[in-house]
Image (cartoon, rainbow, N blue to C red):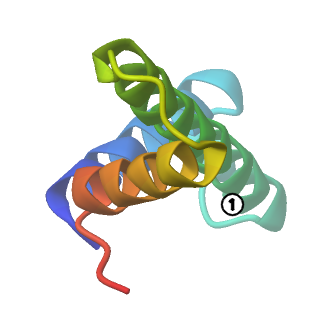
Amino acid sequence: MNERAIKLYEEATEFAYKTVGKEHAGKSYFQGVIAGKFAELIVKECIDCAVWVGKSNHNPVEPIHTAHAVKRRIEKHFGVEE
C-alpha cells in the first residue's frame, strides 16, 4: 500500500475505535467497520481526483479522454501502476 492508502486505513481504524470501542478490536464487526470506512474514504478520494481533473481541464475534449485523465489521476494519487 502506498503512503496515502496507509493513512486512509489508519483513519478508518481510528474511526472504528471511536464508534465501536477498543474492547471490540479484533472482532469481525470491528473489522467490518474498518473495511466500510476505508472503502468510503477511498471513494471520496477518487471523487476528489475526478473533480480535480474536471476543474483543471479547460479544453473541451472527448469523454473518453476525460475518463482516461481521471483514471491516470487516481492511479497517480494512490501510486497504483497498471
17 up-or-down from 57: above or below: below
Q: Nearer the viewer, residue 82 or 7?
A: 82
* Residue 19 picture location, percent across and down: 67, 24
Q: Nearer the viewer, residue 10 or 54?
A: 54
Residue that mark 1 sits on: 31
* Residue 48 picture location, percent across and down: 45, 25
Residue drawn at (67%, 56%) of the image: 35
Residue drawn at (29%, 73%) of the image: 1
Q: Is residue 71 left or right of residue 39?
A: left
The quadrant where residue 44 appears: top right
Looking at the rendered structure, the kind of residue marked 1 is Gln
The quadrant where residue 52 appears: top left
Residue drawn at (65%, 40%) of the image: 37
Q: Nearer the viewer, residue 15 or 74?
A: 74
Residue drawn at (58%, 43%) of the image: 62
The quadrant where residue 5 appears: bottom left
Q: Residue furthest left?
A: 3
